[in-house]
Image (cartoon, grey):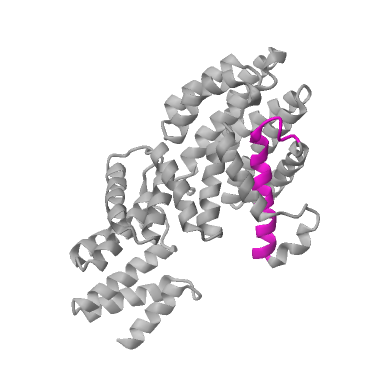
Amino acid sequence: MNKVVKNITLFLVILFPLVSEAQSYDSSRYNLLQNPFVQIEATEAINAMYNFEFEKSKSHFEYLKYRYPGHPLPYLLIGLNYWWRIVPNYTNEEWDNVFIAYMDSTELFAKQLKKENEIEGAFFLAASYAFAGRLYSERSQYRKAAIAGKNSLKYLQECRGHEAYSPELLFGDGLFNYYAEWIRENYPLLRPLMWVFPKGDKKKGIEQLKEVSRNAFYSRTEAQYYLMRLLAQEEKDIRGGMQVAEYLNKSYPNNAYFERFYVQLLYQSGRYTQVEGLAKGMLTKIDSAQTGYEENSGRYAAFFLGHIYQIRKKYEESKKYYKMGMEYSEKIGATDKGYYFYSLLHLGNIAEKEGDDELAREYYQRVKKIADRNHAARDQAKIRLKNM
């Protein structure tokens, strides 16, 4: 009951100031997506947000809320400010309620805006439902995620054909084109359900995201974020994904997610000298409690360093970092992830090389016990135990 009251209170705290402001609409403020002066006002705040300077960013967005009362743009941006606090570690639910509250506020004012500007109103409705649906999906609230996704698609379809109004409108279309086809390819059981949706086009989706990343303002970095992930993870275009990741890391050096993704791609490409320096820097940022850098980033960085030093046969350093990565994983309950299993496997391998077969068996048995039956790490542990 206390949780319900807390959630209602949070929503009202955000909503009540908005209701009073909603009456002060100015017709000149209906088309903020096209307004270059608004973009100039928002530039510093948006850059600060993606660089994880959240309080600085939020204060600018609060000014936009005062400057353009009743428009959904400031509320969407403040919501994104909280969204990017969640991104580095989705297990952290600290910001969930306030994020959803701002998405609800965006939806409320977007519906009012739609009466005066259908295209811009539809854009903000599609965006607010999409971001809310993404969080619901991460929290395994699939019914809420499905409803939000359906609503987002409804308004996304209203935006189609109006790309000349603003390149921002291509962002949702690009994501839909890619994932509509991707779902059909990767989830055959869902194909019968997909007939009600328009067919996708992955190649077109990638091109649309590239166009947004070049020409949009508000959606540019979000498009680059998805482009980086799709190229590297789904299209297996490591080089293309790394180009985007390197740009994002240089543009926003304090963004923990961008740095982690970039370092991961460097590691996969065998560029260990670069990985070594960046990974140690990430661990230093964690030790200094820098915003966004926490255990999830630590388990990546420590594993990379452990493997690099194992390759170089610096076993004491390697063991130190593997164990450090495992400690980070244990703190956030990520002991069911590949890096945790492979840390144990590599520690077993080092123990074998150092002549401690008993310790090696302990590591391999542990992998065999905790890894899923179909996981490659479990198969490797069984083989090594058999060989011993």
Q: Position of residue 107 (x, y in %)?
A: 68, 31
Name the residue rendered at 61%, 18% in the picture. Answer: 17
Q: Quadrant of the C terminus?
A: bottom left
Q: Position of residue 332 (x, y in %)?
A: 40, 53
Q: Position of residue 41 (x, y in %)?
A: 52, 20
Seen in the image, is 68 located left or right of residue 320? Answer: right
Q: Quadrant of the N terminus?
A: top right
In this view, the residue in front, 187 or 31, is 31
Q: Is residue 285 visible?
A: yes
Name the residue rendered at 26%, 59% in the picture. Answer: 321
In this view, the residue in front, 298 or 328, is 298
The image shows residue 9, relative to residue 358, as above or below, that is: above
In this view, the residue in front, 65 or 220, is 220
Q: Position of residue 280 (x, y in %)?
A: 27, 50
Name the residue rendered at 63%, 21% in the picture. Answer: 35
Q: Is residue 95 visible?
A: no
Q: Verify whether residue 363 appears in magenta.
A: no
In this view, the residue in front, 171 or 304, is 171
The image shows residue 181, relative to residue 382, as above or below, that is: above
- In terms of secondary structure, what is the magenta stretch mainly? helix
The image shows residue 132, relative to residue 35, as above or below, that is: below
* Quadrant of the rendered image containing residue 192: bottom right
Q: Verify whether residue 166 appears in magenta.
A: yes
Seen in the image, is 159 located left or right of residue 239? Answer: right
Name the residue rendered at 50%, 56% in the picture. Answer: 232
- The residue segment tinted magenta is 162-187
